[in-house]
Structures are given as structure tokens and as C-alpha cells.
Image (cartoon, rainbow, N blue to C red):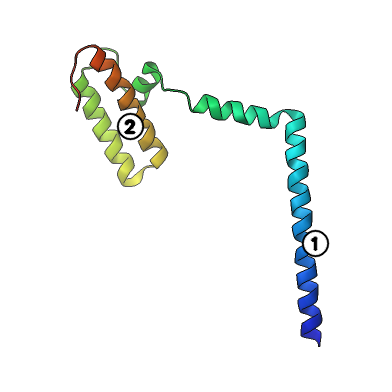
Amino acid sequence: MAAKILANLIIMGSGILGRAVLQAYRKALENANKTGVANETIQNIRRASKVMTEQEARQILGISEQSTWEEVLQKYDGLFERNAKNGSFYLQSKVHRAKECLEAVYQGKGEGKR
């Protein structure tokens, strides 16, 4: 008998808690829309997804404007492998995007592609 009452209390309590969490989530979304936090977040996501600039790519790979394509590839290989072994996937993807960005620049200059 006590087990049945306890089970009913647990079920009713979890239902009440679930509704309260759902209400709090809806209220948080409503407040975010009122204060503009939601729009700011969307703008930050859009800003982050923009194409990498040549200067940013050079900073990531640690090369200068006078660097040759071979130097770019050497830096890329070293950084990519280091992050593949014990680094982060995020850094590895940034290194790859930097190489892609510079690849377009160097192709325009007539230097090779790997």
C-alpha cells in the first residue's frame, strides 16, 4: 500500500515538475525576445559563419605576406597534425579553413595547389 502511494506521489511530482520546467523555458524565450538577446544571438551566429579573411588566415597559420605556398603547406601540415593528435577539432578546422582561404589567394598569384 505504501509503495503504491509513493509511486503515485513520484508520478504526480514529476508531472508537476515537468510542467514547471516547460513554463520556465517559455518564459525565458519570451524574455529573450523582449530584451533582444535572441536577435543578438542570431547576429553573432551570422557573424561567426562569415568567410575568413586573408589576414586572419595568415595569423592562424603564423605566416607573413611574403611566405611561399610551400611554407604555407609546411605550417598547415604541422598545425593540422598537432591538433589531430592531441588538440581540438575546432582548432583543426580553423587551420584547415585558413589553408583553404590562402589556397584561393595563391592560386590567383599562379602558385600551385596541393
- Measured along the vertical axis of the image, is residue 51 above or below residue 92? above
Q: Is residue 9 left or right of residue 47?
A: right
Gap between marks 1 and 2 measured at Cα: 49 Å
Q: Are marks 1 and 2 in contact (CB under 8 Å)?
A: no
Q: Which residue corresponds to the image point at 29% horizontal and 19% vertical from the top-left?
A: 104
Q: Earlier in the sequence, mark 1 or mark 2?
A: 1
Q: Which residue corresponds to the image point at 24% horizontal and 17% vertical from the top-left?
A: 107
Count residues near mark 2 (Cα–Cα under 10 Å), then give few for <14, some for 14-19, many for 20+. some
Question: At label 2, which amino acid type do we have?
Answer: His
Percent coordinates x, y for residue 69 in the rendering = 21, 20
Secondary structure beneath dot 1 equals helix
Question: At label 1, which amino acid type do we have?
Answer: Ile
Percent coordinates x, y for residue 8 in the rendering = 79, 76
Any part of residue 61 in sight? no
Q: Which residue corresponds to the image point at 19% horizontal and 13% vertical from the top-left?
A: 110
Count residues near mark 1 (Cα–Cα under 10 Å), then give few for <14, some for 14-19, many for 20+. few
- The residue tagged 1 is 16
- Measured along the vertical axis of the image, is residue 14 above or below residue 61? below
- The residue tagged 2 is 96
Q: Which label sits in the foreground, 1 or 2?
A: 1
Q: Is residue 47 left or right of residue 1?
A: left
Out of 54 and 107, give the one closest to the viewer: 107
What is the total number of numbered labels drawn onto the structure image? 2
Q: Which residue corresponds to the image point at 73% horizontal and 32% vertical from the top-left?
A: 33
Quick one: quadrant of the N terminus? bottom right
Percent coordinates x, y for residue 114 in the rendering = 19, 28
Out of 76 and 101, give the one closest to the viewer: 101
